[in-house]
Image (spheres, rainbow, N blue to C red):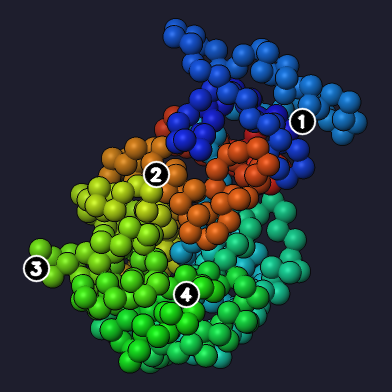
């Protein structure tokens, strides 16, 4: 496939006009050129001729079908959502391969080509079952043309009842390395993050030190003060779950978990940019505090995403969805989002003023790095997966190429 007449997003976070050549499921070549002053042309004929030469002699090449005219679109890597629960009526914790596949289909349709869904706080036996099903899905289900399952983010059960949010308090348990071992084994290596509230367990530091070399330890749904959070980060925790939400606020005398993360440069920070969870000013502040290299855009979407207003469930609890807001029926607390990651990226750019180049990197390269999959995903480079999203100048979706095949859009 040749994707021509595009603005290619390069690993240095700049756009350059050019074209991308894919072969099978990988990027074969990327051609770019500096935009000449006053030139309205998006492609140099020599670049296109070079791209065609790769295909000539290939009996499977069909010029009309295998050339995509991007019409000046931005070409960015497929987005990677490493923290969300579901969409289109399905939840990852439904625990079925059919549900995972439908979730993966929807995510690809909106430009998210790799996923690491999040679990809720549920009974340990239920979580083990969900993880085993996920491992089976990864082994047996053909995911050609849909988002690839690249990890799992365990948001519970080692959290704080005081900051449980939409998590079910009756299933919260203290940190337990033997239980974590069960999770890691059941998932077949898919669990990439395990969330904890370090203040809620007797010896969370020992827990962190025991598991940190096999899984990222994240601070999640925690009421920890600065000192406790700092000790956890220094012990090896290196990830912060949905910054600002389900944690103490950042105060000038009590900086809390956010202040501790700020003082530990290797900690990566998730943020929900759905226009509901975090004010645009606070989004800008997070990027300035932490630096764009540490920020990861997530959706935290639940099963009501892509669905009409109504009543849904999350972690066994009833949720009301009205417009862009999802709240628990029991007390009105926010219960995840109903915004997919592509729309979160748009909100970050349009409402919070985050530069497009920064927002794209925080939804592609940064999550790929956190997941340990940057060798294959997260940037447009030769030899990497041919997951490409085409956006017009208003950030409207023009096409999604998943592993070298057009999934959404017109050729």
Reply above or below: 105 against 321. Answer: above
Q: Residue at x 78, y 26 (%)?
A: 54
Q: Residues within 10 Å of mark 4 (few under 14, many from 20)?
A: some
What secondary structure is marked by label 2? helix
Q: Nearer the viewer, mark 4 or mark 2?
A: 4
What secondary structure is marked by label 4? loop
Q: Give 337 or 150, whichever is nearer the viewer.
A: 150
Q: Residues within 10 Å of mark 3 (few under 14, many from 20)?
A: few
Residue that sits furthest to the left in the current view = 253
Number of the label disc, if any, that sits on residue 359: 2
Query: Which of the two discs, 1 and 2, labels the residue nearer the N terminus?
Result: 1
Number of the label disc, if any, that sits on residue 65: 1
Query: Which of the two discs, 1 and 3, labels the residue nearer the N terminus?
Result: 1
Residue 46 placement (x, y as % from top left):
68, 13
Q: Residue at x 34, y 37 (%)?
A: 355
Q: Residues within 10 Å of mark 2 (few under 14, many from 20)?
A: many
Tell whether 246 sits left or right of 29.
left
Query: Which of the two discs, 2 and 3, labels the residue nearer the N terminus?
Result: 3
Q: Which residue is mark 4?
A: 212
Q: Residue at x 37, y 59 (%)?
A: 266
Residue 126 placement (x, y as % from top left):
55, 87
Tell whether 101 sits left or right of 394.
right
Query: Which of the two discs, 1 and 4, labels the residue nearer the N terminus?
Result: 1
Q: Give 327 or 367, whichever is nearer the viewer.
A: 367
Query: Are circles 4 and 2 on residues that touch, CB within 8 Å?
Result: no
Number of the label disc, if any, that sits on residue 331: none
Q: CA distance from mark 1 to mark 3?
A: 62 Å
What secondary structure is marked by label 3? loop
Q: CA distance from mark 1 to mark 2?
A: 32 Å
């Amino acid at each position: 496939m040749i994707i021509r007449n595009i603005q290619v997003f390069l690993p240095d976070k700049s756009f350059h006009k050019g074209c991308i050549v894919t072969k099978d499921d990988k990027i074969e070549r990327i051609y770019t050129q500096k935009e000449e002053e006053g030139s309205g042309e998006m492609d140099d004929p020599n670049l296109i001729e070079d791209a065609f030469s790769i295909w000539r002699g290939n009996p499977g090449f069909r010029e009309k079908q295998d050339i995509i005219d991007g019409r000046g679109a931005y070409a960015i890597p497929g987005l990677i959502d490493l923290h969300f629960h579901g969409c289109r009526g399905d939840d990852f914790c439904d625990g079925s391969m059919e549900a995972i596949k439908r979730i993966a289909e929807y995510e690809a349709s909106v430009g998210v080509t790799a996923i690491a869904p999040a679990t809720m706080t549920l009974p340990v036996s239920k979580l083990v079952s969900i993880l085993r099903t996920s491992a089976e899905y990864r082994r047996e289900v053909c995911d050609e043309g849909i988002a690839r399952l690249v990890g799992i983010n365990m948001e519970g059960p080692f959290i704080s009842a005081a900051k449980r949010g939409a998590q079910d308090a009756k299933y919260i348990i203290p940190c337990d390395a033997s239980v974590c071992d069960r999770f890691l084994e059941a998932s077949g290596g898919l669990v990439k993050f395990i969330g904890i509230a370090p203040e809620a367990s007797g010896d969370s530091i020992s827990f962190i030190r025991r598991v940190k070399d096999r899984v990222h330890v994240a601070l999640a749904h925690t009421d920890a003060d600065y000192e406790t959070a700092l000790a956890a980060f220094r012990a090896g925790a290196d990830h912060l779950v949905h910054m600002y939400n389900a944690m103490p606020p950042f105060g000038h005398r009590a900086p809390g978990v956010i202040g501790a993360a700020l003082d530990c440069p290797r900690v990566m920070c998730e943020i929900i940019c759905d226009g509901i969870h975090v004010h645009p000013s606070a989004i800008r502040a997070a990027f300035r505090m932490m630096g764009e290299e540490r920020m990861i855009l997530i959706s935290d979407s639940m099963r009501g995403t892509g669905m009409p207003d109504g009543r849904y469930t999350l972690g066994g609890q009833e949720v009301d969805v009205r417009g862009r807001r999802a709240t628990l029926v029991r007390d009105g607390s926010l219960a995840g989002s109903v915004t997919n990651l592509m729309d979160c990226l748009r909100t970050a750019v349009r409402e919070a003023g985050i530069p497009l180049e920064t927002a794209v990197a925080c939804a592609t390269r940064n999550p790929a790095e956190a997941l340990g999959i940057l060798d294959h995903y997260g940037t447009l480079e030769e030899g990497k997966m041919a997951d490409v999203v085409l956006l017009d100048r208003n950030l409207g979706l023009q096409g999604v190429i998943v592993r070298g095949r057009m999934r959404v859009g017109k050729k």
